[in-house]
């Protein structure tokens, strides 16, 4: 990739499409901080680093053979795994039912 500038307003969604070998995966890796740029930097609101502030929705979905909680929190930094707590009552269930659901083991 050369001379790429990507500006995404808050709350907007972006789809990247193109032929094989056009740099889609490289752009994804650069945006997610998985690929170190030879020059320049990924910034969010002027601050270098976007890890944990962008999301990726892949073409194929997958889950680990683990609990719902582990799958939901796998992308969260260790200090934020508390963010994957059941909300309870949002979907009509009690907090106890939500807690049991988050502890359920998924069979991938």
Image (cartoon, rainbow, N blue to C red):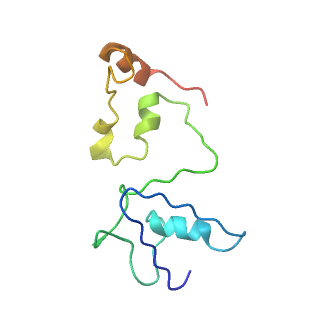
Residue 93: quadrant of the picture: top left
Q: Residue furthest right?
A: 20
Q: Nearer the viewer, residue 30 or 6?
A: 6
Residue visible at 48% across and 69% down in the picture: 30
Quarter of image, res 85? top left
Left or right: residue 25 versus residue 97 is right
Q: Nearer the viewer, residue 32 or 45?
A: 45
Q: Is residue 36 above or below residue 85?
A: below
Give percent across and percent down for residue 24.
61, 68
Vertical comparison of 105 with 28: above or below: above
Quadrant of the drawing holding the N terminus: bottom right
Q: How many marks?
A: 0
Q: Which percent across, then down, holds residue 37? A: 46, 78
Residue lying at 43% horizontally and 37% vertically, measured from the top left: 72
* Residue at image coords 60%, 42%: 61
The residue under the point 67% across, 69% down is: 18
Q: Nearer the viewer, residue 15 or 56?
A: 15
Q: Is residue 103 left or right of residue 24?
A: left
Q: What quarter of the picture does the C terminus occupy?
A: top right
């Amino acid at each position: 990739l050369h001379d790429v500038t990507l500006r995404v307003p808050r709350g907007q969604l972006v789809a990247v499409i193109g032929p094989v070998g056009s740099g889609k995966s490289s752009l994804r890796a650069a945006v997610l901080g998985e690929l170190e740029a030879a020059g320049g930097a990924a910034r969010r609101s002027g601050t270098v680093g976007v890890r944990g502030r962008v999301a990726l929705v892949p073409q194929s979905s997958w889950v680990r053979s683990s609990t719902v909680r582990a799958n939901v929190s796998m992308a969260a930094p260790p200090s934020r795994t508390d963010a994957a707590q059941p909300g309870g009552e949002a979907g009509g269930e009690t907090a106890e039912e939500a807690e049991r659901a988050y502890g359920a083991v998924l069979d991938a």
